[in-house]
Image (cartoon, grey):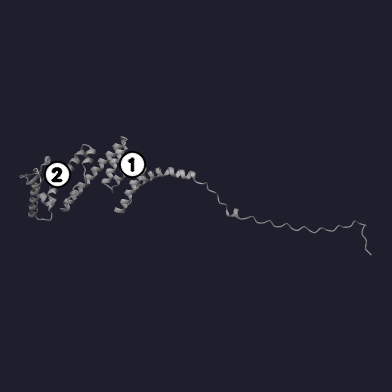
Amino acid sequence: MSDSKPLLILAVLALRPDRSASRDYLADLLWPDSDRTRSRRSLRQAIFNISRNASDELLIDDEARSGLNLARERLAVDIVEFDEALEREDFAAAARIHRGPFLAGVDHRAGSEFESWVDSQQSRVRIGLEVAYTHLVSDALEAGETERAVEHARAFADLNPLDERAQSTLVRALRAAGDEVGALQAYEAYRTLLERELGEDPARELEERVDEIRDEVLGPATEVLDSTAAPEVEEPSPEAERPPAPSPPPPPSPPPRPARPAAGWWRLRD
């Protein structure tokens, strides 16, 4: 369908508790900028397009309520199946059913009220997906199936490249699998993307976990380098380098005194 409004009608009906809505409600929700006459005419055209393009009759008139009912058994709705899988705690089925954000690729511009409804559905799916993958990773780790845990964690991280919980789960799974280098690489990729897209840094808790992993990886190498390093040689102090001052020369010896002749042995010469 070139016009997305028929798909939006089906989406609204599929997620309402009783799978039904009044025509006035649908017209006001999807054509909020039009008056009642124009919005009801646009709704009739959208309903006609659904009937013309669907192989089965998907919409049933509720004449008593002037409304529309969705023939649920004739239409597979993935988000409904996703919710049912979560309710029965079949987390593997929930992850398998999920194909992307709610109404991804569909033009759903139809006023602020409808946009808020779409945002709430997308948020609900994200939370459900986080619950599913958290259980899948934890169950795999408890069973010692680290490769399967990494597979689930990587799928969760790929769906949420800027989500801290998803990236932290991947780092934890890689570390449990003994791939500390892979955990550091995953963190660096997330940190770079977060800084480029949002101008933010990872949460302190995740940084502390990565610091522990980095210490595990680099610690042994640091110890080897320390043990093989050459011993430090103590440099002599400036006083030790200065040559000793020369000793002063001894004082000169006095000249020898002449011997005095013995008494009685001297006389004047003529």
Rendering coords of residue 143 (x, y %)? 30, 34
Q: How many marks?
A: 2
Q: Is residue 152 left or right of residue 105?
A: right
Q: Is residue 194 above or below residue 83?
A: below
Cβ atoms at labels 2 and 1 below 8 Å apart: no
Quadrant of the drawing holding the C terminus: bottom right
**Of helix, strand and loop, which one carries label 1?**
helix
Which is nearer the eye, 147 or 111?
A: 147
**Which one is closest to the eye, mark 2 or mark 1?**
1
| Residue occupying the point 27% across, 46% down | 158
| Residue furthest out toward the top | 143
Rendering coords of residue 201 (x, y %)? 33, 51
Mark 2 neighbour class, 10 Å CA radius: few under 14, some 14 to 19, many 20 or more: many
**Disc number for residue 257:** none
| Residue furthest out toward the right | 270
Q: Which residue is mark 2?
A: 14
Rendering coords of residue 32 (x, y %)? 13, 54
Of the image marks 2 and 1, the number of the one nearer the N terminus: 2
User: Could you give the CA–CA distance between mark 2 and mark 1, rounded to whole angstroms?
Assistant: 39 Å
Which is nearer the eye, 13 or 98?
A: 98
Q: Is residue 202 visible?
A: no
Q: Which residue is mark 1?
A: 174
| Residue furthest out toward the left | 63
Q: Is residue 171 visible?
A: yes
Q: Is residue 267 left or right of residue 174?
A: right
**Of helix, strand and loop, which one carries label 2?**
helix
Q: Is residue 184 left or right of residue 67?
A: right
Rendering coords of residue 39 (x, y %)? 9, 53
| Residue occupying the point 46% across, 45% down | 225
Q: Is residue 270 above or below residue 142?
A: below
User: What amino acid does circle 2 point to?
Assistant: Ala
User: What amino acid does circle 1 point to?
Assistant: Leu
